[in-house]
Each structure stands twice: as C-alpha cells, then as structure tokens.
Image: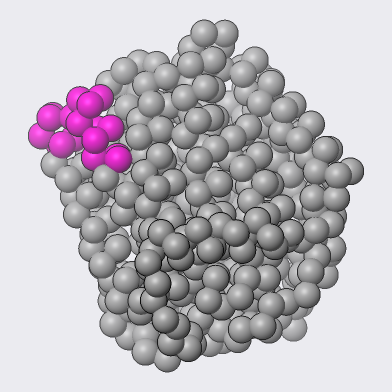
Amino acid sequence: MSAGGLRGATVALQHREFRIFWIAAFVSNTGGWMQSAGLPYVAYQLTGTNGGVGATGFMQYVPVLIAGAVGGWLADSFDLRKLLILTQLAQACIAFALWVLVSQGWATPTSLAAVAFLGGLASGLNIPVWQSFVGKLVPRSIMLNAVTLNSTQFNAARACGTFSAGIVIALAGPSLVFAIDAVSFVAVLFALSLIRDYRRRDPVPRVHPVRDLIAGARYVWGTGAIRSACFAIAAVAGFASPLFSFLPASYGQDEFGVTGWRLGLLLGAGGIGSLGLAPLILTRGATMSRRRLLGVSMATYALATMAVGLAPTWQVAVVGLACYGGSYLAIASALNTTIQLTARDDMRGKALAIFVMCLTGALPLGLLVWGWAADTIGIRPVTVGAGAMLLGATVIMWFSGTFDAMVVPVADS
C-alpha cells in the first residue's frame, strides 16, 4: 500500500480523541479476547461436551439480549463517557470474579454460567454505549473509516488475545487469562480520563424507557436499511457464529490433538485473518457497493465455515478460520456503518442496541442447538451443514433485495 493509501486508510487515527480510545480499546479487548478463549476452554474441561460449552455461551449471551435494549436507551439519554466508565468497572469486577473462581478451584458448570450471565448483563449495557461513543469521536464524513478501524483493532486484539490465551493456558493454566482481562480495563479507564473533546448530542427530553424503546423498535422496523442490517446479522449469528465458540477447543483437542502454540494458533486464526484483510477493507471496501461487499463477505464466511468442517488437518482448519475472520470483519464493518450513517442522532443508540439484540438473540439459540447437534451427530457434519444454511440465506438475501436496501442517503445528525 502506498503512503497516501495508508494515510487514507487510517485517517480517523489523525483525530487525537479517537486515537487515544483506539489504542486503549486494543489493550482492553486483547484481555477480553483472552477471557473469551478461556471461558469455553474451562467449560469444556468441566463438562467434556460441546453442549456444556454451548450452555455456558447461552448464559453469557442471553442477558446481552435483555441488557442491550437498556444500554441503547442509556446511550441516547445520558453522557456516554460517564456510562462507559461504569460499564468498564463492572466488567473488570466480573473478570476478577472469574479469576477467583478458577484459580481457587471453585469453578463448577453452575458457578461459571452464573458469572457468565452477569458478564453478559454488563456487556449488553456496554456495547451500544461503546458503539455510540466511537461515532462521536470523528466527523461523520469519515465514519466508515472509524468504524472499520474500530473493528480492525477489535480483531487485532482477537488475534493477539486468543493466540496469547492458548499459550498462557498451556503454560500457566486458564485462571491467569481472567486476571489479565481484569487488569486490562485500566487502559480504557485511563483513556476516558484523557478524552474531553467529542461530539455531544443536543439535549433531548427523557421519556419513559419502555416507551422510548418501543419507539426505537418502530423506527428500526420502519427504516429499511437498519431492518435489513438486523436480518443479516441475525443470519450470520444464528447459522455459523456459534460454532466458533467451541470449534477451536473441540477441534484442537479432540479432532487434531493439538496443544500449546498450535492450539493458540487455532484460537487466534480468525483474528489473524481479519488483520490480513483489514487494509483491503479499509481501501477497497470504502469504494465497493454495499450489496457487493456484503454478498461476497457473507458467502465467503459460509464457505469458510464449511471448509473448517471438512479440514483434514489442523493447518487447513487454521486457513479456514482465518478466512472466516477476514470475512466477518467485512460483514461487521459494513453493517455497523449502515446503522451509524442511517440512524438519526436521537435514535442511534437504540438502533445499535436492537442490532446487537438481533445478534445476541440468534447467537445463544445457535449455541444451544449446534452444541447439542455436535454432541449428537458430530462436530464436522454440523459445521458443514451450518455453513450451507448460511450460504443459502445469503443467496436469498442477494436476490430478495435485502442488501440493496442498505444503500440509502445518510441521515441528518
């Protein structure tokens, strides 16, 4: 990439507030991904089944569905920076609780699920607030760049965090990953103490939260671009994403018998793939039509899922997981940008919350269904079947005009 192309691909980082938050988010998300890798690993060790991992994931994501709606209302009603401080402190305490449970040998499937549930509540409140705050750190004219860079650091953290988790688990056991996650929240808290200059919304009258959320749901349903984005993320989350909660651990230990750095590579392959495709998405993605970008990336995501299910060796599985990670970055960036640019300022938090609810509503159901199916008929046929279903859903969306609906004028701020 040329120097000019690199500057264009990272234009949002030229804004001080965004740059500070971006760096801190990378540190914190690295810790978060270490926990995300450690939690299913511990669940698998405690239960020995994919269903057990799926049940833990169900308990982790179901509260996000509930709390996400509240988080969206909070994001549209209160100061985003102050809200983020509270959500970061809550998540740090939950990570600390996981460290205590695992390090002291007190972890059971029930206690692990209970703490995962609390973590899901905190995460559900945090996600729409976080996404809304990112949108306030840069001018609207470079929103796609900021959203893609935010997704890139998230996936860079995924690569570093999951790979590091595999190494840490192999060398020191899983408890240390939760301790590292708890400490990593300090980075975001410090960054928030430095950030003062961001676009604040005009004061809006506060109404009853239930009425406000109903109004948000009506707005989303009546806005074709946002409604289509919600359908797309639900398909991705329900059909294929659940498998990647237990695929690396299940495949790594049972199918391929790998540990140590090889397991770390399996865990981190998705993040590595997203890093590899990030420059292309930052440059070419900004010029491609939304329809083409989403169609190609969702089809690639589905085919990568099928490839992992058919992988004869762990090395081939790594390649498939890397393709999955790169395509997911394109999907997430395109859908998130659609909502950021389409939603009215007073509805953005609620629109993002409903988007997250579609993701976290489909994901836990998929975790239960695919976890049970993997234990019943085997992880490989389930993985191939899930990928085929997503591919079919992508074809339907392509010809039904779902992707076309996301090409819309930008809403006024």
Residue depicted at 74% across the width and 26% down the height: 388
Residue depicted at 68% across the width and 70% down the height: 342
Q: Does residue 270 appear to the left or right of 130 in the view shown?
A: right
The location of residue 199, given as percent across then percent down, is 49, 87
Examine the image and state in which quarter residue 317 appears: top right
Could you tell me if residue 128 is visible in this image?
no
The location of residue 355, given as percent across then percent down, is 56, 54
In-front residue for pair 326/260: 326
Magenta stretch prevailing secondary structure? helix
Residue furthest toward the bottom? 197
Residue furthest toward the right? 399
Compared to residue 211, the image places residue 318 above or below, namely above
Residue depicted at 40% across the width and 72% down the height: 207
In-front residue for pair 413/110: 413
Q: Is residue 162 magenta?
A: no
Q: Does residue 141 appear to the left or right of 397 in the view shown?
A: left
In-front residue for pair 126/328: 126
Span of residues in magenta: 101-117
In-front residue for pair 118/174: 118
Compared to residue 52, the image places residue 102 above or below, namely below
Identify the image quadrant of the N terminus: bottom right
Q: Does residue 222 appear to the left or right of 270 in the view shown?
A: right
Examine the image and state in which quarter residue 303 appears: top right
